[in-house]
Image (cartoon, coloured by chain):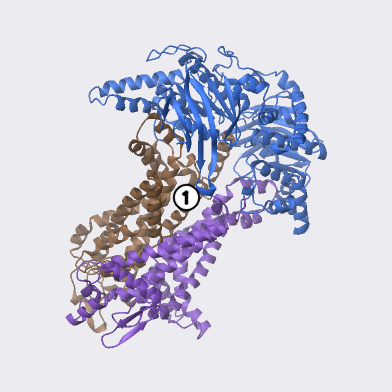
Chain colours: A blue, B brown, C purple
């Protein structure tokens, strides 16, 4: 009998069918990856395995058997025994997944005591043992800490320890590394791998990241809109996808090994439309609306490729937060140059200061020391010529103003500042509307979107609006702060392609701030690697990626999940060796 | 006495204690229409709104209503009370008859109906006017603290803290003692309540302004080249409307209770001006002879505060459906709502 | 990161803040009360004072001296005590001296100390009741969410929040003491004299004050628990087979701690206001009743003294609550 046997599973939330006729099996000790973009229903499947939809108002159809328990018909008591006892779950956000008020060890002990009749003391001892097993140093002391005293990676380890407490047959991991930095992600994936080798438990890994799946599972199941798209051995599916959607998904995944193809982008990446009319938030710009020769009001000529002229410079930038003894330098002496028409990638993990640096470059934050120069002159405060595209497509647009109004802001501000004339207000208004319409169309939206509100758009579309707003100021530099990290991979590819096109066409300089090494390589001419407020390495992208000088850069690159399971296994071995060699870096 | 308000204040205090940028708490765009739709969907809030509207109508039409009855709230009717029995109203049921619809006041013989409807005028008028003062002060100082320099913020926040800590009833009691008796009492009570208890709303406004200020769309507006004033007007103020309205809706019943309490203690609105709280001062002595003298003002207070509280809750739900929906478990919408959130989680995963 | 390391510093900062707040309150109260419009001496003394009495009051208030000097004397009296002439003799008023009552020539400090036990009995007794009733009701309605119990409790607590404390007190008194005659009309008995009678006589005042406050605690407890129940970590424990009893009693209730503490501080001021009403209504000889009396006869030193003492308790309660809050939610200290 299989460990997991799902037949014709359907989950409906009211009128929404989140999972639609899904069947699969997972044998004892095997590892299956559920891969899909947001809205594919993959997490709903994971919850269904533990019967977590019971009592929530969701309608579950079909049958689910896990470790011999029929989840659909089991009594509440049987279900409780299954949860945590036979099958344990690890969640995405390790901070919110633990009770903030109790010590980690107590929480693990509590779960253990639900399934095993032992004393409090014995349960605490068990908690310490599993914490030690997942690699928490000084587990006796750390078991008394609360979740907020742990780092992100440690918290995820603690959650895995909780899962291990009752020695389950199946581990369900729902996006276990999505909230983590890439080096920490590698550690957690390695840990999962080791534990699976040692305990022989089965693994069901839910992830949006094909690379994470390639690293960790034997079989992969691709989902879309609640349905199965493709199911097979991970090597086969990733190397030779049979379904068009799988091919499209894989094609959109940025590869850290691939050199940037300057100038000509492959056609499927340049905002290629997804033939998808069913989903309302599908992010397919119409191919004909993305014109390569968008009209320009000011007639500035398109510049192809970067020039040597420096537009933006940072000199010894430093920024502290807090005062006195508790002051912390988020950015600590960073000097950079950005040339006209080039893309400078700034890559770093959380806490590296990259966002703070971006905000200082556009003048939203005043540096504590050092200066920003625009075209050779020291600039302080905001400068219309240096614009920004923000990370969060939700909070970057005012929900109470139509997107047209938001895009028109820079135009209106300039009209006010420039002329101050009373007459011609109506003419101005017409000109503004015309220009906004032009910008909307340029970024792949429609003129009719002018009067719509942000909540009517998908994440990718909102990011396009953000780009249009930045363009409205006629900038020569755009700082993009994690512009695609909140987007699905296919949408991500489209937005990246759009930025590339705009750059070539308008001669824009881009500063592309991101945590994703592959995306940064895909867009950048030059790359700066940041760590703890400093730039540890800077240079042409290919040089940095192919022959990194700094050990931290090497560590980062080694941690990026590979799409080829064979490569992934080799990298894992390399990481283990590197860890023995340079343990201080983690 | 101001449970709903303090509860909201506690929530606001929590919000400001654990600052977090939660763009999801910013209500959606289509504003007023959506608000009305959501408010109408709540039956209890709708009933409360009707009750509040009726009360306002009664308060506005008080002179007209008493004219129809043919009485006024201040005329003594010594003939209608039995001074031999200590001043109880003559006749059954506390003196109810065709001329005096709800009977007369013990001891004075003043018409009870007239005093009750004129009392509504005083209660609602004082409460609403005090709310206007509180909101004006709170919004101004809250925004100033959030947008000002560090020193301005420190100073205003400390002042706000002091006003939050001041016990409102005690300070009002004391202040009302020292103002000359010829100052019009309803205006005085309004001023005292309004000027003393704006602290919590200022805190709420400051916290919300700080949250909004940190949102990316405000940064984007700065990058467009607009100045602080325009950004405050276009990007910040609309975002403050929801919490301010919510809070103001909760302040009105609080103010009604405070006014009633002060008048009950004999330091608020003084005779001959009628007020519900003041009518209750002597009610315990007369409850056997004229039960309506106790029950009517008490009932009026209860219904008014209840209706305003329910309406306030409804307004909050309509303005911030996400926060409210978490608490909505138990109504008929439970299933849909759970489904919504589950679907939401799935799409955002 | 050490979770608890910042706490002493936090307590210190909060303590300094409390002292500053008290100082500010004393300045405000002093300025407001002694820079009143009109003839201060006349107002202070009351409308029936003779010119000689008014003159005496003016002298006692040192009205010829500038305000800050007078305030200094007031603080001096608080810290080291002061001598007062009462016409013929000189009376020493020991620190903390809040001056002399114009009605009775008694020392305000002594007056307050005599009344304080009554008020403390009322407020703290009621506080125990309202916390038990409020949190209990809140937990019950969160546990039985979606069922009849919850709806009934929700309706009850809503009615509770809408009833002014003097209305519920009046009704309780009339029904319990007047109609049913289950209890005699309350008369304060000292705790030290007869604890049983003390409690029986305070039962109705406690109930009237506590029922109203309990309603808001029930609402807050319920809403905080429901909010916690919607959080991710509850899902974790559900997914690990932890039972509903433990989820409600251990995890959801813990999430309601901090808000309840914050509310208790926030409500303390209004509860003290409620205590004034309760004392007046039931005729309990506490600070509140004395304050209302002093206000009605415009006995300013008594009013100022009482406002300061009550303000002291409220500000202190707020500070204690802040520290408790920090202990309950240690992340506060860190941020």
Q: How many marks?
A: 1
Q: Is residue A267 visible?
A: yes
Which residue in the structure is indicated by mark 1? B16
A503, above or below A95, in the image: above
C42, above or below B341, in the image: below
Q: Could you say which is closer to the camera, residue A3 or residue C333?
A: C333
Tell me residue A360's x, y (percent): 47, 33
Tell which residue pokes out farthest to the bottom in this image. Answer: C88
Tell me which chain the residue with mark 1 is part of: B
Q: Quadrant of the N terminus of chain B?
A: bottom left
Horizontally, residue B175 falls left or right of residue C10, namely left
Residue in the picture at 19% in, 76% down: B78
Give residue B252's quadrant in the image: bottom left
Give residue C333's quadrant in the image: bottom right
Neighbourhood count class around disc 1 (C-alpha, 10 Å): few under 14, some 14–19, many 20 upward: some
Horizontally, residue C330 falls left or right of residue A414, namely right
Q: Is residue B297 visible?
A: no
Q: Could you say which is closer to the camera, residue B56 or residue B136?
A: B136
Q: Could you say which is closer to the camera, residue A459 or residue A431?
A: A431
Horizontally, residue A296 falls left or right of residue C241, namely left
Tell me residue C329's x, y (percent): 56, 55
Tell me residue C314's x, y (percent): 43, 66
Horizontally, residue A256 falls left or right of residue B125, namely right
State the SS at label 1.
helix
Q: Quadrant of the C terminus of chain B?
A: top right
Tell me residue A536's x, y (percent): 61, 30
Q: Could you say which is closer to the camera, residue C30 or residue C257?
A: C30
C96, above or below A4, in the image: below
């Amino acid at each position: 009998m299989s460990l997991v046997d799902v037949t014709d599973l359907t989950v409906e939330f009211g009128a929404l069918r989140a999972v639609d006729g899904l069947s699969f099996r997972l044998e004892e000790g095997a590892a299956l990856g559920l891969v899909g973009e947001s809205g594919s229903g993959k997490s709903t499947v994971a919850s269904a395995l533990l019967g977590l939809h019971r009592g929530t108002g969701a309608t579950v159809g079909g049958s689910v058997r896990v470790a011999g328990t029929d989840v659909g018909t089991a009594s509440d008591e049987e279900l409780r025994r299954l949860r945590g006892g036979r099958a344990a779950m690890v969640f995405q956000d390790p901070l919110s997944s633990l009770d903030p008020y109790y010590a980690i060890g107590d929480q693990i002990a509590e779960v253990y005591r639900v399934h095993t009749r032992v004393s409090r003391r014995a349960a605490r001892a068990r908690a310490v043992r599993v914490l030690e097993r997942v690699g928490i140093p000084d587990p006796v002391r750390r078991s008394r800490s609360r979740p907020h005293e742990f780092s992100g990676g440690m918290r995820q380890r603690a959650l895995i320890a909780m899962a291990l407490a009752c020695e389950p047959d199946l581990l369900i991991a729902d996006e276990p590394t999505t909230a983590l930095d890439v080096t920490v992600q590698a550690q957690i994936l390695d840990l999962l791998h080791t534990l699976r080798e040692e305990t022989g438990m089965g693994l069901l890994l839910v992830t949006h990241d094909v690379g994470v799946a390639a690293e960790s599972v034997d079989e992969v199941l691709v989902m879309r809109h609640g349905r199965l798209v493709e199911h097979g051995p991970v090597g086969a599916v990733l190397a030779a996808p049979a379904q068009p959607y799988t091919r499209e998904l894989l094609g959109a995944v940025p590869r850290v090994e691939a050199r940037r193809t300057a100038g000509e982008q492959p056609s499927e990446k340049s905002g290629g439309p997804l033939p998808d009319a069913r989903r309302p938030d599908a992010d397919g710009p119409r191919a004909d609306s993305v014109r390569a020769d968008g009209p320009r009001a000011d007639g500035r000529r398109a510049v192809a490729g970067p020039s040597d002229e420096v537009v933006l410079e940072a000199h010894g930038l430093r920024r502290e937060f807090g005062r006195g003894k508790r002051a912390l330098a988020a950015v600590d002496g960073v000097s950079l140059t950005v040339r006209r028409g080039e893309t400078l990638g700034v890559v770093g993990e959380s806490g590296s200061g990259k966002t703070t640096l971006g905000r200082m470059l556009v003048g939203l934050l005043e540096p504590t020391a050092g200066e920003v120069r625009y075209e050779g002159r020291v600039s302080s405060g905001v400068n219309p010529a240096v614009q920004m595209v923000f990370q969060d497509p939700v909070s970057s647009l005012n929900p109470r103003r139509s997107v047209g109004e938001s895009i028109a802001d820079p135009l209106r501000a300039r009209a006010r500042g420039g002329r101050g004339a009373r007459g011609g207000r109506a003419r101005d208004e017409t000109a503004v509307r015309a220009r906004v319409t032009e910008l909307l169309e340029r970024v792949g939206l429609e003129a009719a979107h002018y009067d719509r509100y942000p909540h009517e758009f998908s994440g990718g579309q909102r990011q396009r609006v953000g780009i249009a707003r930045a363009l409205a100021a006629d900038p020569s530099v755009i700082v993009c702060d994690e512009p695609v990290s909140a987007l699905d991979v296919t949408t991500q590819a489209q937005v990246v392609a759009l930025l590339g096109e705009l750059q070539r066409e308008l001669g824009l300089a881009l500063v592309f701030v991101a945590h994703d090494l592959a995306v940064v390589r895909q867009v950048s001419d030059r790359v700066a690697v940041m760590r703890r407020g400093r730039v540890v390495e800077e240079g042409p992208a290919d040089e940095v990626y192919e022959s990194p000088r700094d050990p931290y850069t090497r560590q980062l690159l080694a941690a990026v999940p590979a799409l080829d399971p064979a490569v992934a296994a080799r990298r894992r071995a390399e990481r283990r060796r590197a860890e023995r060699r340079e343990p201080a870096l983690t | 006495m101001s449970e709903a308000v303090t509860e909201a204040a506690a929530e606001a205090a929590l919000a400001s204690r654990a600052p977090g940028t939660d763009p999801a708490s910013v209500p959606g765009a289509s504003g007023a229409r959506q608000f009305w739709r959501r408010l109408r969907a709540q039956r209890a809030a709708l009933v409360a709104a009707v009750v509040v509207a009726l009360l306002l109508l009664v308060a506005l039409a008080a002179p007209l209503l008493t004219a129809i009855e043919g009485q006024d709230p201040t005329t003594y009717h010594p003939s209608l009370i039995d001074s031999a029995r200590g001043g109880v109203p003559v006749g059954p049921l506390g003196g109810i008859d065709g001329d005096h619809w709800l009977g007369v006041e013990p001891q004075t013989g003043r018409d009870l109906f007239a005093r009750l409807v004129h009392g509504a005028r005083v209660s609602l008028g004082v409460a609403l006017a005090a709310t206007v003062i509180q909101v004006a002060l709170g919004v101004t100082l809250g925004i100033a603290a959030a947008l000002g320099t560090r020193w301005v913020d420190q100073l205003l926040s400390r002042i706000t803290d002091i006003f939050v800590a001041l016990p409102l009833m005690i300070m009002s009691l004391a202040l009302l003692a020292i103002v000359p008796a010829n100052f019009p009492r309803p205006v005085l009570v309004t001023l005292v309540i309004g000027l003393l208890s704006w602290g919590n709303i200022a805190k709420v406004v400051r916290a919300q302004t700080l949250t909004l200020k940190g949102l990316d769309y405000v940064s984007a507006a700065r990058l467009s080249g607009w100045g602080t004033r325009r950004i405050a007007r276009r990007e910040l103020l609309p975002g403050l409307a929801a919490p301010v309205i919510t809070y103001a809706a909760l302040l009105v019943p609080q103010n009604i209770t405070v006014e009633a309490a002060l008048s009950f203690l004999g330091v608020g609105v003084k005779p001959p001006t009628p007020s519900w709280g003041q009518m209750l001062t002597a009610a315990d002595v007369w409850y056997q002879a004229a039960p309506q003298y106790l029950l009517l003002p008490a009932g009026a207070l209860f219904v008014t505060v209840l209706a305003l509280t329910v309406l306030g809750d409804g307004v909050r739900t309509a303005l911030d459906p996400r926060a409210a929906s978490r608490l909505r478990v138990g109504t008929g919408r439970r299933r849909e709502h759970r489904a919504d959130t589950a679907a939401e989680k799935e799409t955002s995963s | 990161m050490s979770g608890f390391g910042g706490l002493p510093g936090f307590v210190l900062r909060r303590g300094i803040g409390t002292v500053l707040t008290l100082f500010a309150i004393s300045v405000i109260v002093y300025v407001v009360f002694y820079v009143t419009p009109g003839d201060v001496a006349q107002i202070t003394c009351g409308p029936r004072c003779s010119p000689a009495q008014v003159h005496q009051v003016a002298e006692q208030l040192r009205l010829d001296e500038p305000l800050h000097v007078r305030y200094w004397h007031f603080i001096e009296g608080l810290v080291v005590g002061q001598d007062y002439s009462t016409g013929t003799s000189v009376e020493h008023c020991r620190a903390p001296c809040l001056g002399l009552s114009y009605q009775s020539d008694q020392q305000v400090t002594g007056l307050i100390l005599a009344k304080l036990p009554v008020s403390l009995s009322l407020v703290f007794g009621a506080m125990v009741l309202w916390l038990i009733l409020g949190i209990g009701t809140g937990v019950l309605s969160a546990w039985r969410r979606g069922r009849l119990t919850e709806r009934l409790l929700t309706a009850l607590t809503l009615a509770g929040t809408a009833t002014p404390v003097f209305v519920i007190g009046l009704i309780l008194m009339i029904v319990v003491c007047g109609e049913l005659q289950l209890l005699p009309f309350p008369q304060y008995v000292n705790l030290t004299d007869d604890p049983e009678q003390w409690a029986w006589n305070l039962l109705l005042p406690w109930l009237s004050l506590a029922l109203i406050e309990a309603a808001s605690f029930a609402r807050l407890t319920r809403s905080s628990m429901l909010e916690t129940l919607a959080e991710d970590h509850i899902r974790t424990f559900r997914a690990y087979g932890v039972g509903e009893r433990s989820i409600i009693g251990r995890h959801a209730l813990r999430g309601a701690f901090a808000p309840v503490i914050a509310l208790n501080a926030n409500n303390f001021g209004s509860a003290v206001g409620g205590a004034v009403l309760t004392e007046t209504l039931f005729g309990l000889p506490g600070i509140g009743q004395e304050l209302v009396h002093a206000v009605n006869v415009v006995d300013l030193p008594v009013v100022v003294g009482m406002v300061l003492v009550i303000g002291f308790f409220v500000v202190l309660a707020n500070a204690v609550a802040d520290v408790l809050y920090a202990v309950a939610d240690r992340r506060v200290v860190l941020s």
